[in-house]
Image: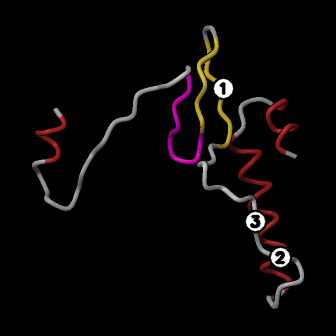
Amino acid sequence: FFDFINSKHPNVRFTMECEKNDELPFLDCLVTRRENNFEVSVYRKNTFSGLGMSFFSYCQFRFKLNCIKTMRSRAYKIYSNFIFLHLEF
C-alpha cells in the first residue's frame, strides 16, 4: 500500500509508526492505550528544552501574553485527563 501511495508524487512520502509500550506519538499528541480506552497528552521529543519566550525580551506585551494564552489553550484542548493537565502545570 505504501509503495502505491508513495509512487503518486515524488515529493510526497508517507510513513507509518508502530506503537511502543502502548504509546503512539501522533502530531503533537501522545496517545496511550490503557485497558479499553485511550488517553491523550502532549508529546515532546527528546530534544525539547522547555524554553519559550522570555518575559523580559524586547517584544511587544501582546505577543508575550498571546504566547501564554496559546500554551494554556493548547493544554486544555489536547489533554484527555485532568490528572495529566495537573502534572503539566
What residue is shown at x 71% (from left), y 52% (from top)?
Answer: 74
What residue is shown at x 76% (from left), y 54% (from top)?
Answer: 73
Q: Is residue 66 magenta?
A: no
Where's residue 12, x and y in %?
A: 23, 56
Q: Is residue 17 left or right of residue 21?
A: left
Residue located beneath label 2 in the image: 54
Q: Secondary structure at mark 1?
A: strand
Q: Is residue 27 magenta?
A: yes
What residue is shown at x 67% (from left), y 43% (from top)?
Answer: 42
Quick check: 6 above or below 83? Answer: below
Whether pointer 3 and pointer 1 mark residues with C-beta atoms closer than 8 Å, the reply is no
Nearest-to-viewer mark from 3 and 1: 3
The amino acid sitting under disc 3 is: Leu
Mark 2 residue crowding within 10 angstroms, few (<14) / some (14–19) / many (20+): few
Magenta stretch in the rendered image:
22-29
Where's residue 31, x and y in %?
A: 58, 30
Magenta stretch secondary structure, dominant: strand
The foreground one among 69 and 83 is 83
The amino acid sitting under disc 1 is: Glu
The picture quadrant where one finds residue 18 is: top left
Distance from label 3 to label 1 (Cα)? 26 Å
Q: Secondary structure at mark 2?
A: loop
Mark 1 residue crowding within 10 angstroms, few (<14) / some (14–19) / many (20+): some
What residue is shown at x 71% (from left), y 31% (from top)?
Answer: 80
Q: What colour scheme governs how the chains and residues are painted in the rendered image of this protein?
A: secondary structure
Ranked by sequence position, the earlier of labels 2 and 1 is 1
The picture quadrant where one finds residue 63 is: bottom right
Residue located beneath label 1 in the image: 39
Distance from label 2 to label 3 (Cα)? 8 Å
Ranked by sequence position, the earlier of labels 3 and 1 is 1
| Res 51 label | 3
